[in-house]
């Protein structure tokens, strides 16, 4: 801080510990302003850190994994599988004779496992009654803040193959 | 404050010590007087002088206090040490050119005259000035002091150091300041 | 040493105003940081750079106000 003081001014301790009663209020205010400016700097640093992380972010490479055969499950049926790793359960739903949808089973509210409700044709979280659309994973009702992550499926030679995950 | 100023005229002091007794009455330092009372040369003369704190413009005691315990108010009064802060190091006692601060060993605190701030801030006179029968210690308007033969001066020189004070010393007319050389007063006996 | 004079009360109001402004800016910056973090964690990475720039602008404002307070403080104490 010596850089920012003119050479002929009193040393800093004379200002901070002034012998004049009247200067007390000035000292308190100046010290508070200094502290708040440093807090502002700290928050700016936080934002810079986020920006750096965003800049250097690489999209993750997902493995290609076979999930199920085309006729393995009936229409309206489900299959639970793990993708891309064992700690990430996913749910495959056969919505029609020729249409399939797969989503992450982890509810975006508090990570309960969602299940497929055939009567109402939607994905439902039993914990707090959050409903997700089976067509695109968006939230129909309830506390979940974001749509379900979608598992990208491809048909390769009579099989359904998972090739990636799209976050909501 | 209120236009009143403190004037000290040692030539008027009759040695009655009323100021000492009056100062002692203050509740915050009951029993201890904050007046500096001098027998000038007791062997030779009965002359006495009573002094209060001079409340310097740039108080040396406040400047040297390591605990930031001595404060000078906006009206120029230098206050006695703050109880929570004083560490009884006696820095101020040794630094004051006039020898005013007193170190109270049992209380472990420096005490000195604060011009009876509880009285002067309300427009009253300090205790010592109120009781002094000869008005050697006077707290009056400058116009009243102008009627005296002596003239007030508030500049002191200690060697090359200049000290200006809030309290005035009555000096012979024409003498603007007082030079004090400590060596002059060291008794070579 | 020259005797120093005690300061006046005029600049206090201006300093109080600057302080209030800084606190307001800080609240905005706090919200901005939390919103940027939430957006980034949710995957909207494109919001990170604009948020960083705006945060920087706010910080520069705070720095300017701090310099202003310091100048008022110095003038009040007649340091120069």
Image (cartoon, helix red, strand yellow):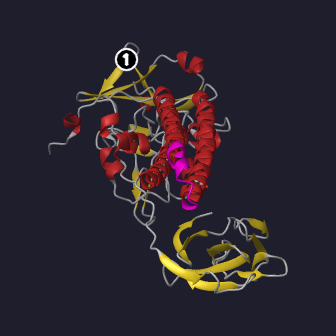
Please state, as top left, top right, bottom left or bottom right, where the C terminus of chain B lies in the image.
top left
Residue B60 in picture, x, y percent from top left? 36, 40
Please state, as top left, top right, bottom left or bottom right, where the N terminus of chain B lies in the image.
top right
Q: Nearer the viewer, residue A138 or A69?
A: A69
Tell me what residue is drawn at x 74 percent, y 66 percent: A139
> On what subunit does the disc labeled 1 rest?
B
> Farthest left residue?
B189
Q: Which residues are magenta?
A: C41-51
| Image position of C6 with respect to B60: above or below | above
| Image position of A130 with respect to B31: above or below | below
Q: Report the label total.
A: 1
Quick one: label 1, few (<14), some, or many (20+) residues within 10 Å? few
> Farthest top residue?
B174
Please indicate whether residue A39 sits to the left or right of residue C1 in the image.
right
Residue B136 can be seen in this image: no
> Farthest front residue?
A157
Q: Main secondary structure of the magenta part?
A: helix
Quadrant position of residue A131: bottom right
Which residue is labeled 1 in the image?
A: B176
Tell me what residue is drawn at x 47 percent, y 54 percent: A50
Please indicate whether residue B50 sits to the left or right of residue A93 in the image.
left
């Amino acid at each position: 801080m010596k850089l920012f003081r003119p050479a002929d001014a009193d040393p800093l301790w004379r200002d901070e510990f002034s012998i004049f009663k009247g200067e007390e209020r000035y000292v308190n205010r100046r010290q508070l302003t200094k502290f708040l400016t440093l807090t502002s700097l700290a928050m700016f640093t936080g934002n810079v850190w986020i920006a750096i992380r965003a800049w250097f972010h690489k999209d993750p490479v997902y493995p290609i994994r076979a999930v199920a055969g085309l006729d393995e499950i009936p229409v309206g049926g489900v299959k639970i599988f793990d993708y891309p790793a064992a700690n990430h359960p996913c749910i495959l739903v056969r919505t029609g004779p020729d249409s399939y949808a797969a989503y992450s089973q982890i509810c975006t509210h508090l990570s309960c496992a969602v299940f497929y409700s055939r009567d109402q044709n939607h994905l439902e979280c039993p914990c707090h009654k959050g409903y997700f659309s089976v067509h695109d994973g968006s939230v129909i009702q309830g506390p979940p803040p974001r749509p379900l992550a979608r598992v990208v499926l491809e048909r390769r030679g009579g099989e359904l193959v998972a090739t990636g995950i799209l976050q909501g | 404050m209120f236009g009143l100023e403190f004037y000290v005229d040692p030539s008027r002091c009759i040695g009655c010590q009323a100021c000492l007794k009056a100062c002692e009455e203050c509740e915050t330092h009951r029993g201890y007087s904050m007046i500096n009372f001098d027998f000038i040369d007791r062997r030779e003369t009965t002359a006495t002088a009573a002094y209060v704190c001079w409340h310097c413009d740039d108080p040396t005691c406040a400047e040297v206090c390591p605990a930031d315990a001595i404060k000078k108010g906006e009206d120029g009064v230098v206050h006695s040490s703050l109880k929570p802060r004083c560490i009884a190091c006696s820095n101020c006692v040794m630094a004051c050119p006039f020898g005013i601060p007193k170190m109270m060993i049992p209380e472990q605190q420096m005490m000195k005259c604060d011009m009876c701030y509880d009285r002067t801030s309300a427009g009253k006179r300090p205790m010592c000035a109120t009781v002094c029968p000869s008005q050697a210690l006077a707290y009056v308007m400058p116009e009243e002091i102008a009627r005296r033969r002596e003239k007030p001066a508030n500049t002191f020189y200690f060697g090359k150091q200049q000290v200006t004070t809030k309290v005035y010393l009555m000096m012979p007319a024409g003498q603007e300041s007082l030079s004090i050389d400590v060596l002059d007063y060291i008794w070579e006996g | 040493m020259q005797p120093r004079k005690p300061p006046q009360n005029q600049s206090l109001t201006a300093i109080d105003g600057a302080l209030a402004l800084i606190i307001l800016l800080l609240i905005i910056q706090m919200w901005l940081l939390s919103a940027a973090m939430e957006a980034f964690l949710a995957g909207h990475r494109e919001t990170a750079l604009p948020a960083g720039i705006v945060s920087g602008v706010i910080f520069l404002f705070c720095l300017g106000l701090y310099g202003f307070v310091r100048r008022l403080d110095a003038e009040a104490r007649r340091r120069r």
